[in-house]
Amino acid sequence: MSGGTNRARMPEVPPAGPQLLYADWCRVLVDRVRELIPTVSATRRARVVYLRHADEVVTITDDRGTFWVRRTASGGSGLYDSDRHDMHTARTMAKSIAGMLDANLSGPTQ
């Protein structure tokens, strides 16, 4: 190896798949979180989905076409999907949500 730094390769992001409606996107996301944390509870109220595990709560909302995921304890910061709304994005974000709900699941190797 010559001179530069050893950089990890970023995973390739596939082209956007078919767009999902908000309810379908939430269903994919919740199903994936439940694969990772079987004890997570999900509740839907109007246009908000609440995911609860231990003492953590995450909300999922549709803000005029931008799908937001926020950890309530973080003061509103979170993740969003403003354009793809596809299965790949929902499943990828579900991994991050699992890490928000359970620190043992955060990080790239989980």
Image (cartoon, grey):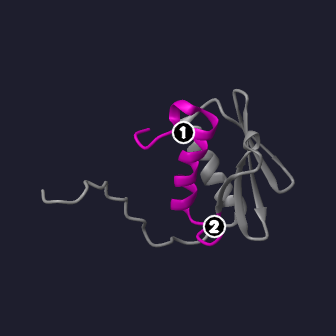
Q: Position of residue 24 (x, y in %)?
A: 67, 59
**Badge 1 amino acid:** Glu
- Judged from this view, the residue extending furthest toward the front is 3
Query: Is 41 placed left or right of 10 in the picture?
Result: right
- Quadrant containing the C terminus in the rendered view: top left
Amino acid under label 2? Leu
- Where is residue 83, by image quadrant? bottom right
Q: Which residue is mark 1?
A: 35
Residue 66 in picture, x, y percent from top left: 71, 67
Q: Would residue 99 be found to the left or right of residue 51 on screen?
A: left
Q: Quadrant of the N terminus?
A: bottom left
Q: What's the distance in space between the residues labelled 2 and 1, CA to CA?
A: 20 Å
Q: Which residue is mark 2?
A: 20
Q: Which residues are magenta?
A: 81-110
Residue 38: in magenta span = no
Within-10-Å neighbours for mark 1: few <14, some 14–19, many 20+:
some
Q: Could you say where residue 57 lies in the image, as x and y percent from the top left? A: 74, 38
What's the residue at 81%, 52% (across, down)?
48
Q: Residue at x 57, y 53 (%)?
A: 93
Q: Is residue 60 above or below residue 102?
A: below
For the stretch drawn in magenta, the main secondary structure is: helix
Residue 90 painted magenta = yes
Q: Is the residue marked by circle 2 packed among few (<14), some (14-19), or many (20+) residues within 10 Å?
A: some
15 vs 10, nearest the viewer? 10
Which residue occupies 69% across, 27% down?
54
Q: Secondary structure at mark 2?
A: loop
Q: Residue furthest top?
A: 54
